[in-house]
Image: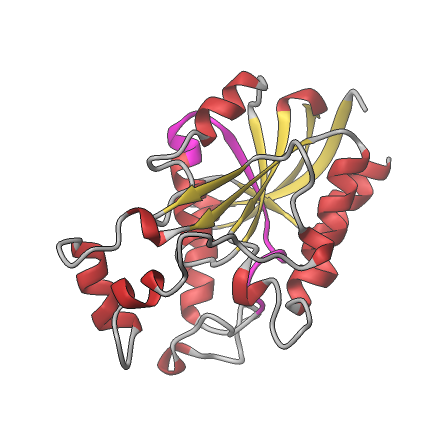
Amino acid sequence: MDQIEIPVRYYMDYPGGYDYAFEDLALPCAECAFLLVDVDGGYSVKDGAAHPTTEKFIAPALSAARTVGMKVAYVHNDMRQVVDPGNIACEFWTKTKFAKGNMVDAWAKSGDDFKPTYAPCVAPREGEPNFAKWMWSGFRDTFLDTRLRSWGIRTLFVVGYSRRACLHYTCAEAIGHNYRVILLRDCSNPPGEIEMPDTLDDSLPEGGWVNRMMLRQFEHLIGYTTTAAEFVAACRA
């Protein structure tokens, strides 16, 4: 496939705008890559089944990308790289994320043979690199940027988890490395799922104002969005 024509959405954040804009982008397929962020662990396999978003949205989009020969790359968490009592991130995240225990002990239990776990529908294939990260961004202290540049990539189609953490910060750093970012906005946490209970709002299509804020921040500062169905259709065109 020489070119992919993809419909995209973004948000006009200026007087007289303050609304969504839509257009079609025509992009050389050889300069595009499909990036999966943290599509492993509890979001990949839970109680023997894939997360519904992973199975119904991410997997078909990934399959479409592979079908047209688009490069595919993964990033996943591996806190073993930094877990020690002196790490400030571990100190703080233990207080904000653990009711009992701490992050250092939790990751120490994973052992030296830790490997990310994927549902079969989104598991990496041979030749698809999978970079271990310790912070939110898949670009921090990894060789992701080096690999993408060696492929001649200019545009990233990005999916994964979560919209207010690793997915968001990976995309934010991607534009800082001069990549065009296109987020498949329904290939992440469904409405309300990553919301704190006091921020839920059923009147919003995003399920709450945290999800709404993160998506609005993305669409006016970082990049374009599209949907899994639109991406699959563009790959089939």
In this rendering, would 54 be left or right of 209?
right
* Position of 128 relative to 190 (above/below): above
In reply to whether residue 120 is colored magenta, the answer given is no
* Position of 136 relative to 208 (above/below): above
Judging depth in this view, the residue of 1 and 129 nearest the camera is 129
- Which residue is painted at 19% across and 63% down in the image? 92
In reply to whether residue 187 is colored magenta, the answer given is yes
* Position of 55 relative to 200 (above/below): above
- Which residue is painted at 46% across and 63% down in the image? 212
x and y percentages locating residue 189 in the rendered image: 55, 64
User: Looking at the image, can residue 131 be seen?
Assistant: yes
x and y percentages locating residue 78 in the rendered image: 40, 51
| Picture quarter with the C terminus | top right
User: Looking at the image, can residue 15 be seen?
Assistant: no
x and y percentages locating residue 180 in the rendered image: 52, 30
Which residue ends up furthest to the right in the rendered image? 237
- Which contiguous range is marked in magenta? 174-190
| Picture quarter with the N terminus | top right
Labels in figure, total: 0
